Amino acid sequence: MEKIVINGGKPLYGEIEISGMKNTALAVIMGSLLIEDKCVIENLPDISDVSTSFQILEHMGASVRKINKTTYEVDNTRTKGGISPSELVRKMRASYYLLGAELGRFRYANVDQQGGCWFGERPIDQHIKGFEALGGKFEISETTGYYNIDAPDGLKGTHIFMDLVSVGATINTILAAVKAEGTTIIENAAREPHVVDLSIFLNKCGANISGMGTNIIKIKGVQKLHGCTYNILPDMIEAGTYMTIAAATGGSLKIKNVIPKHLESITAKLMEMGVEVEELDDTIIVSGTGTLNKANMKTQVYPGLPTDMNAQMCVLLCLVKGGTSYLTEGVHENKYRYCEELRRMGAVIKVDGRVAAVEGKGILTPAVVKAVDLRAGVAMVIAGLAAKGKTEIEDIYHIERGYEDIVNKLKKVGADIKKINVPDPYQYEIAN
């Protein structure tokens, strides 16, 4: 068992390089299933979810070759559908992209139900709507609980209106429609940068997708895709996380390899709170002023404030000196499980449904806390960096699913932080 130990209360200064976007990387890796050829994928983040994704493909017959830390070659020429390993699929939510990719290539899919962070019920009804509109027949196996989709008569282009904006459903429908017969139009589509990035990747492989980045996406089906070399875009959530770290510690960080436009909603809220933000071409400089103003926030679909920044922003609201701020979750339910961990550090937060009332106390106190999910885990890191004294964070495997080398990145900008191995009490009892 590993945990992160932080001696906080110190402003951080220096430069941080942002890695490739987790959410794009996983969609592109799973989407490569559609391509009976070799693809070279560059700027991949060195995180456990990427490793798990490649392990799934290898189990299905793909050949995966690591070129360097951030570049992999994947050859799906001999990949077979319907045999993804349950124990790996259940480790992350993005494994449900296997459904669209398998259906698009093999005209059937057989995949266990996905895992990942739990934010209450996260149904895949909009995914199913897309698959069925294209000609797929969906069922859940009574014996295994697996999702099964079959399209014995092939897939045919159609007009689909999503009942709500869903990144996952938009991506899965794109994957299924790329090689369908005819033209597919998705209305009320998600506009997130990783939807755009996946579409550009597929187009580079010979797909015909247009309208990405708007709420109407058009896909003209093609018979075959070919391999390509593709560079994943920078991770806007990782960048946003380090922006909040600069604000929380009162330091100044030069955050490199970013697309400032993707960060506009985060930048706007930080500036409203009194944080100084300077935008350059591919760099953003964030400087804390020592005082944070209260602010009301609501997470939304892109280009609004990302739901993946909910927990990080909540930490900042705890550090406001006086006044109550309101944080509303506009995308998922049950995003506030992390609040109990922040309360251990002295936070005063009242949650009513999707709204958290955060009383600004100006400080957080060190404690032993847990990473209850990926973004909640990194919020505990931010809180630990802001609190004066020793904070210990357990269950850090959640953090490592989405943040590349976070401990060393923070060390380089002056953080007193380390990752340590601790004996598992249960194993110790067995051994003795």
Image (tube, helix red, strand yellow):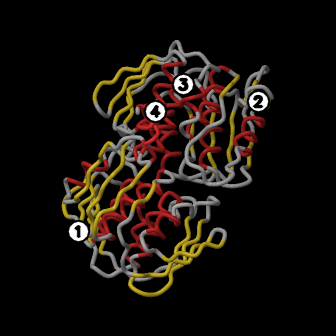
- Residue type for callout 4: Ile
Where residue 29 sits: x, y (%)? 48, 31
**Rounded to the nearest whole Å, what is the CA distance between mark 3 and mark 4?**
43 Å
Q: Which residue is label 3 attached to?
A: 33
Where residue 405 sits: x, y (%)? 30, 45
Looking at the image, the residue that sits furthest to the bottom is: 322
Q: Considering only vertical position in the picture, is 179 above or below 262?
A: above
Quick one: quadrant of the C terminus?
A: top left
- Residue type for callout 3: Leu
Element on which disc 1 rests: loop
Where residue 142 sits: x, y (%)? 80, 29
**Rounded to the nearest whole Å, what is the CA distance between mark 4 and mark 2?**
50 Å
> How busy is the neighbourhood of tag 1: few (under 14 within 10 Å), some, or many (20 plus)?
some
**Rounded to the nearest whole Å, what is the CA distance between mark 3 and mark 2?**
18 Å
Whichever of labels 3 and 2 marks the residue nearer the N terminus, that label is 3
> How busy is the neighbourhood of tag 3: few (under 14 within 10 Å), some, or many (20 plus)?
many
Q: Which residue is label 4 attached to?
A: 430
Whichever of labels 2 and 1 marks the residue nearer the N terminus, that label is 1
Q: Which residue is label 2 attached to?
A: 136
> How busy is the neighbourhood of tag 2: few (under 14 within 10 Å), some, or many (20 plus)?
many
Q: Which of marks 4 and 1 is in front?
A: 4
